Image (cartoon, helix red, strand yellow):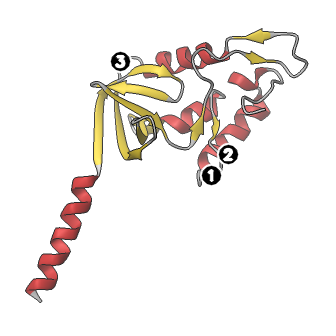
């Protein structure tokens, strides 16, 4: 019995040691990437325009700096608040992949609800999907006018 409890304790402590929380004021790289204390963090579950991305309306005759506007919206919303990120892994660019929040509010969901991000691929993120759909229906953020999706 003692061996079982010791083994279970080691497994649980090992799992806790692998979990990482990064917290502090954030600098915005773009609408889906921040930096906290020198650590680069990419939000899980969303895809947002890159900072230098230009979006085109569906008819292609008008372009606007949607990436810059998305980044500025996140900068304004975060202000000087402390951000807390629960790291879930690392991507091919050595960025931490994480779910982050400010005052208990999930940043990815806020970005989707505000219209500055869309669900990423086949994520299991029903809350983000619903928030993005509401933003599209209301014409918020990148949904203000019909546009060509970045992957199109």
SS for dot 2: helix
Residue 101 badge: none
The part of the image, by quadrant, that contains residue 147 is top right
Instruction: Give the residue at mark 2.
Output: 130
Label 2 and label 1: CA atoms lie apart by 6 Å
Please tell me which of labels 1 and 3 falls first in the chain: 3
- Which quadrant is home to the C terminus? top right
Front residue (pair 138, 124): 124
> As displayed, is residue 13 above or below residue 56?
below
Pinpoint residue 130: horizontal percent, then vertical percent. 67, 45
**Residue at 22%, 67% in the rendered image:** 12
Please tell me which of labels 3 and 2 falls first in the chain: 3
Instruction: Give the residue at mark 1.
Output: 126
SS for dot 1: helix
Front residue (pair 34, 108): 34
Pinpoint residue 29: horizontal percent, then vertical percent. 46, 20
Residue sticking out furthest to the right: 59
2 and 1 marks in contact (CB < 8 Å): yes
Q: Around disc 1, counting alpha carbons within 10 Å, would you say few (fewer than 14), some (14 to 19), or many (20 or more)?
A: few
Label 1 and label 3: CA atoms lie apart by 29 Å
3 and 2 marks in contact (CB < 8 Å): no
Label 3 and label 2: CA atoms lie apart by 28 Å
Instruction: Give the residue at mark 3.
Output: 80
């Amino acid at each position: 019995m003692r061996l079982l409890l010791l083994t279970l304790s080691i497994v649980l402590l090992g799992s806790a040691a692998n979990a990482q929380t990064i917290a502090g004021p954030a600098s915005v790289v773009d609408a889906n990437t921040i930096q906290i204390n020198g650590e680069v963090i990419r939000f899980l579950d969303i895809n947002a325009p890159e900072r230098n991305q230009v979006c085109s309306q569906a008819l292609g005759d008008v372009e606007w700096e949607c990436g810059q506007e998305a980044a500025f919206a996140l900068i304004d919303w975060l202000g000087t608040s402390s951000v807390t990120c629960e790291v879930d892994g690392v991507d091919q660019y050595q960025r931490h992949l994480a779910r982050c929040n400010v005052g208990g509010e999930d940043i990815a969901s806020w970005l989707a609800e505000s219209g500055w991000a869309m669900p990423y691929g086949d994520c299991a993120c029903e809350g983000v999907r619903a928030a993005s759909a509401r933003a599209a229906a209301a014409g918020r953020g990148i949904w203000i006018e019909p546009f060509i999706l970045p992957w199109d």
